[in-house]
């Protein structure tokens, strides 16, 4: 098998916080594997680790919320990337409101959208959730520096892969 690191080590893509809600249970995690994958119709794919608690809630969810973070929002990145919902109720530590379908939406995020889950695709140790955007908000402009992968290298995963 070919190692992809020589290619991916050159990338510095945006990081996202994805939140889910199903059966009264909320979860959220920091995600680096995500991208718009269609223009018309608009579609976005997020990949969640099977080891992550958020994945297990998202398996039962109809919708997910995807949040961008500003460069410097390290506290949010550490909370959602370095803590596991198995041990920590992340939503007691941040201001949020219920979005479409009751999804937790982070008030501090400069932009977010809620998408209906159209498909799930097994990609190995991650599952891709194909989202059809239903509502979106942006409180910033295109010049706002975003939190990227290089900003998060020192965050140890709260729920490391097995």
Image: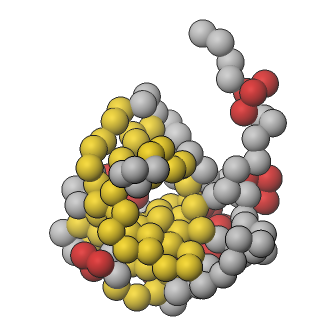
At horizontal 68% and vertical 18% (from top left) the residue drawn is 3
Locate residue 143, reporting x and y percent: 77, 72
Looking at the image, which is closer to me, 70 or 137? 137
**Residue 70 located left or right of residue 81:** right
Query: What percent of the width, then of the height, locates residue 23?
Result: 18, 69
Q: Is residue 11 above or below residue 46?
A: above
Q: Total label count?
A: 0
Q: Nearer the viewer, residue 122 or 37?
A: 37
Image quadrant in which the N terminus is located: top right
Q: Nearer the viewer, residue 136 or 89?
A: 136
Residue 151 appears in the rendering: yes
Taking the view exactly as shown, the residue that stands out farthest to the top is: 1
The answer to whether residue 80 shows anywhere in this view is no
Residue 37: x, y in percent? 47, 44
User: Where, by quadrant of the figure, is residue 121 drawn?
Assistant: top left
Q: How is the image coloured?
A: secondary structure
Asked if residue 17 lies left or right of residue 98, the reply is right
Residue drawn at 37 percent across, 74 percent down: 135
Find residue 84 and report its horizontal and vertical position in percent.
50, 62
Q: Give the quadrant of residue 120.
A: top left
Residue at (36% x, 51% y) in the render: 41
């Amino acid at each position: 098998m070919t190692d992809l690191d020589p290619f991916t080590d050159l990338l510095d893509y945006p990081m996202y916080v994805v939140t889910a809600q199903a059966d009264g249970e909320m979860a959220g995690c920091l995600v680096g594997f995500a991208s718009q994958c269609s223009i018309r119709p608009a579609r976005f794919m997020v990949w969640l680790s099977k080891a992550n608690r958020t994945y297990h809630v998202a398996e039962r969810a109809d919708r997910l919320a995807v949040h961008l973070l500003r460069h410097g929002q390290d506290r949010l990145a550490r909370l959602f990337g370095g803590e596991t919902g198995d041990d920590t109720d992340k939503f007691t530590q941040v201001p949020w409101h219920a979005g479409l379908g009751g999804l937790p939406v982070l008030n501090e995020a400069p932009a977010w959208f809620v998408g209906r889950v159209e498909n799930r695709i097994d990609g190995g140790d991650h599952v891709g959730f194909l989202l059809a955007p239903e509502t979106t908000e942006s409180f910033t402009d295109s010049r706002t520096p975003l939190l990227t992968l290089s900003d998060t290298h020192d965050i140890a995963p709260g729920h490391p892969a097995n």
